Image (cartoon, grey):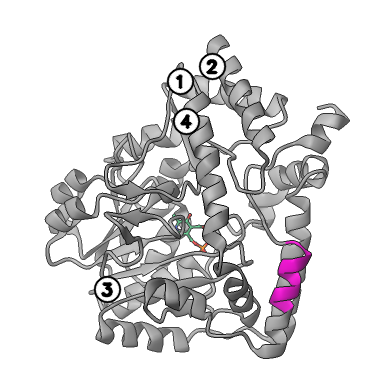
Amino acid sequence: MRLRDQVMLMPRNNWDYGFGALYAALAGLRTGGTQAAGIERLFDQRPVWTTSGRASLYAILKSLHLPAGANVGVPLFCCSVVSDAICQAGLTPRYLDSGVEDYNVSAEDIDRKRADLATVIAVHMFGHPCDMDAIAAVTDSLPVIEDCAQSLFSTYKDKPTGLLSTAAFFSFRCGKYLSAGEGSAILCADPGLRRRIAETVETFEPWSGPSMLAHALSTFAKATLYHRPWYGLVGYPVGTRLDQKLNLTAKSGFDAKQIAATHLALIETRIAGFEEKIEIQREHARMLLGELAPHGFSLPAENDGCHANWQQFALRFHDTARRDQMAQHLFSKGIDTSKYLDNIAEEARAHYGYTGDCPNAEALAKTVLLVPIHYSLRTRDIETMARAINEAAANI
Ligand SMILES: Cc1ncc(COP(=O)(O)O)c(C=O)c1O
């Protein structure tokens, strides 16, 4: 790659953690954090806080008091840290298939496997709400947990995701909306279950002052490398070589920790007015939907009654070769994309007992390509990307 292209490489994710964020986070060290009333106002409910989505899911599962080893229905087409949390809680992932149109868990597959399940996790994938009515119809008395790691500010039938199930959790890790370093909020309307969740989280390890400081500084350094010009020069080449070995972006591992005051302070600073940023991202999605000519791939769409936050923009190719050629072409044009979940079926088979009954999810894993539309990009970037995708699609 030429130096100019390296300098201009468009990052696949948005690590929005600059000097302002560092300052706000460090202020939390002094004040001990706040109760992040912004999130409470948004949902009209006081959340329980933990350090991560995976820790929140663990706390919810522990608090449901399910029999040891019970099956937790979880979409195969989902981040593997969710399976980690299930196993840490002494339970067993029972994989569910997804719909190929919206990438979300299939209510029909839940229905088929219903007798095996003690609870179901509904992941609002890429910020597109699941069909919660269809899920409720097939789960009846089973507790349903919403995974809102990617769906802050998405709505289903005018209700925000997070308020549509037995309990829900968000993630504010860098790369997700709010990009607070780490952090997660649990929502639960049932007072008894909420109390048990809060008690479970109280047993989690708190952050020490020095560890919060070190985490804020290392997040700031990593975020710098996730921005132009450093991304193409350092972040990308180092990340692709060392991410798996050093777990730089926390794609695996599990710490049952409380939330850090630094994360809480930044969440509180950012939440007011954050929907304006999401509107920019929604506008980027609208631009791409208007400009892309889908040859050899399908465009994402919102389901009826749903308003997505467009946390990710996923193209689904008709085969793996076309997806991989598109990724290569976009990279040569200075656009980094993500073959998110490419190896999820292999990983789930090797580590979590997946038996191979989720054909749609396996196909999605090998054909989906995420292209960047984050709010930090400029309109010009989105136009460049639309041209590059159309150009490649015509030639592949
Ligand atoms: C769908 C989904 N669920 C859960 C998580 C876990 O969140 P966290 O990284 O905060 O543990 C993530 C992100 O990693 C995710 O994308």
What residue sits right under mark 3 in the picture?
68
Q: Nearer the viewer, mark 2 or mark 3?
A: 2
What residue sits right under mark 1 in the picture?
294
Task: Say the numbered circle drawn on residue 289.
Answer: 4
Q: Which of marks 3 and 1 is in front?
A: 1
- Of pointers 4 and 1, the one earlier in the residue sequence: 4
Question: Alpha carbon of mark 2 to alpha carbon of mark 3: how far?
Answer: 50 Å
Q: Mark 2–mark 1 contact, CB under 8 Å?
A: yes
Q: What element carries label 2?
A: helix
Q: Which residue is drawn at 48% across and 19% down?
A: 293
- Identify which amino acid the numbered label 4 is placed on: Leu
Q: Where residue 93 appears, x then y in whole percent?
A: 32, 58
Magenta residues, start to end: 18-26
Picture quarter containing residue 51?
bottom right
Q: Where residue 115 appears, x then y in whole percent?
A: 12, 57
Picture quarter containing residue 222?
bottom right
Q: Where residue 135 appears, x then y in whole percent?
A: 20, 54
Question: Alpha carbon of mark 2 to alpha carbon of mark 1: how far?
Answer: 7 Å
